[in-house]
Amino acid sequence: MKQCHFSKNNIAQIDYKDLEALRKSINPHGRMIARKRTGLCAKHQRQLAEAIKRARFLGLLPYIIR
């Protein structure tokens, strides 16, 4: 089982402006990757989902990629 990247590196909050970290958790079609695939803990997966949704709303990330 994978270890949570954010817990391992002592990252407390996931920022919606950190697009490189957010893009790693999005598949080529623009959908969020599941927790089983990313290996994140539940707390950080919820924070990641909220950050991705905020970035999409502000236009920093696309909703779908064609």
Image (spheres, helix red, strand yellow):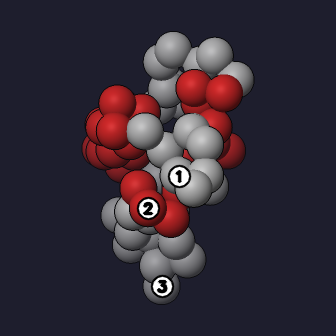
Q: Determine the residue positioned at 67% across, 44% down.
A: 20
Question: Where on the picture, by quarter, is residue 17?
Answer: top right
Question: Which residue in the structure is indicated by mark 2?
Answer: 36
Labels 2 & 1 near each other (Cβ < 8 A): yes
What residue is rendered at 52% in x and 71% in y?
A: 27
Q: Pick whichever, 23 or 65, lies toward us.
A: 23
Specify whether 62 is left or right of 12: left
- Along the viewing direction, whichever of 29 and 60 lies nearer the viewer: 29
Query: Quick one: quadrant of the N terminus?
Result: bottom right
Among numbered discs 3 and 1, the one appearing first in the sequence: 1
**What's under tag 2, amino acid-wise?**
Lys
What type is the residue that disc 1 sits on?
Answer: Gly
The residue that disc 3 covers is 66
In x, y percent, where is residue 40?
A: 49, 44
Q: Pointer 1: what residue?
A: 39
**Helix, strand, or loop for circle 2?**
helix
Q: Determine the CA span between mark 2 and mark 3.
A: 25 Å
Please tell me in which quadrant of the rendered image residue 30 appears.
Answer: bottom left
Q: Residues within 10 Å of mark 1 (few under 14, many from 20)?
A: some
How far apart are the two marked residues, 3 and 1, measured between alpha carbons?
Answer: 26 Å
Q: What amino acid type should be assigned to the residue bearing mark 3?
A: Arg
Apparent side of residue 16 relative to residue 45 in the rendered image (left or right): right
Residue farthest to the bottom? Answer: 66
